[in-house]
Amino acid sequence: MIRQLIAAFAASIAFAAFAIADELPRRGSLGVVLETQEGEGGGVNVVSIQIATQTALQPGDRIISVNGAAVARAGHVGPALGRDPMPGDSVTLHIRRGGEEMDVPVTLVEAPVPQLNGVPVELGSVRSAKGDLLRTYLVRPANDNLVRDGKAPAVMLVQGINCAPAETFSNPGHPYTRVYQVMSDAGFAVYAVEKPGLADSQGDDCTRIGFDEELSGFHAGARALGETSGIDADRLYIVGISMGGLQAPLIAQQANIAGIVTWGTVLMPWYDYMIASFRRRAALEGADPVENEKLMRAWRLVLAEAFVLGKSRDEIAAAHPEAYALVTESYGDLDAFGGRSLQFSIETDRANCFAAWNSYRGRALLLHGGFDWVAEGYDHELAAIVMNRNVPGSATFEVVPGLDHIMVRHESLADSFAKFGQGPIDDAAYVRMRDWLVAEASR
């Protein structure tokens, strides 16, 4: 049960701050547009061919596996191509074409430049504190509605916790793509920095890096955005989704950010959040409360030792063998918590979000889905309280009724838990973000 809950959860420093002319090569790709086949059987369909030299696949093919690894969703295909896939690399796809299944050898091609509404996205890069080049994406505004003196306001998207690419432009229903689309249509430039090890970005495997390394890339990107031609450095905003909302005020400590919008975020220390979150999820699952509390107390001990005190797995196992066994039997390796490394969790817990929100002097809109059981509404409201204590009226907390953590609408909390992420994306949250940001940029 706990493993299932964690799977649902995962389904969310000094720095060099300068933009670099695009010298970062594109990765290898299949050169096709993919679409997840919803419903019984699932799978990934080839919608169209992007690169004419890709002749091994046809529109209508259904991809079942990549190099023997099953793929159930379009987002699974990229990681299945392997670490640092390059043009010219070969992979074997098991596909269904018509009524026949077959293995097809495919040579990867250079990933095409992504587009939004038929307009190429501007590709660039920034260098992280570690020295890695990280891919950046810039979507120019679709109109000049908010342009002043030849410069447009810009929204920086800061992604959730998952090691999933921010390059989602070919998937119109993806939450990130909706941010790009809705904000560009409103007159904003929209910008994102790819995490280390994802898509074109250099660096170690995203699942192994720490929180501070990831944050350094966002710091570099935010500073570079303010120096970009055609961008108004006094009208920079952040939309932080989930973990991105936790990182947003930390980014604002070293960049000129006029406003922050968060969705489904965290303010309390990571240890406190994890314990509260999984205790609540077990209750929603209908677990035996006495047995579950025994497990949660073991988690509390082990995670405090790991996250708060920074002890190794071996040290914890030696000091608390019974509790450690309970946690690892119910969860597994501590070094993969929520799909991220133990170091990521330790550094997240040490990030002082209270201090960041307390020192921030911009404006903020803190949004929480009414049926979001992944994040706490209390956390959002508390961030608003912290800001308004210093500057009354600078922050607003709102609940968007009916939406879950990834902005899918449900009829009840129980329905949201049982059908997490299933259903169409609802634009209510994006509309509220847009309206607030347009009002701020028009001030």
Image (cartoon, rainbow, N blue to C red):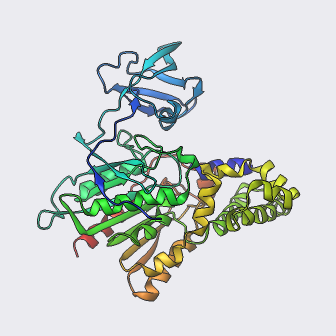
Residue 190 in the image: state x and y as whole percent.
30, 55
Residue 242 is at least partly visible in this image: no
Q: Who's the residue at 60% across and 51% down the image? A: 340
Residue 227 in the image: state x and y as whole percent.
24, 62
The image quarter containing residue 413 is bottom right
Q: How many marks?
A: 0
Residue 365 in the image: state x and y as whole percent.
40, 72
The image quarter containing residue 239 is bottom left
Height in image: 96 above or below 263?
above
Residue 321 is at least partly visible in this image: yes
Q: Who's the residue at 62% across and 59% down the image? A: 345
Residue 160 in the image: state x and y as whole percent.
49, 55
Height in image: 78 above or below 264?
above
Q: Quadrant of the C terminus?
A: bottom left
Height in image: 263 above or below 82?
below
Q: Is residue 182 left or right of residue 354?
A: left
Height in image: 441 above or below 231?
below
Q: Who's the residue at 82% across and 55% down the image? A: 317
Residues 413 and 94: in front is: 94
Residue at the outermost right position: 322
Residues 24 and 393: in front is: 24
Residue at the outermost left position: 149
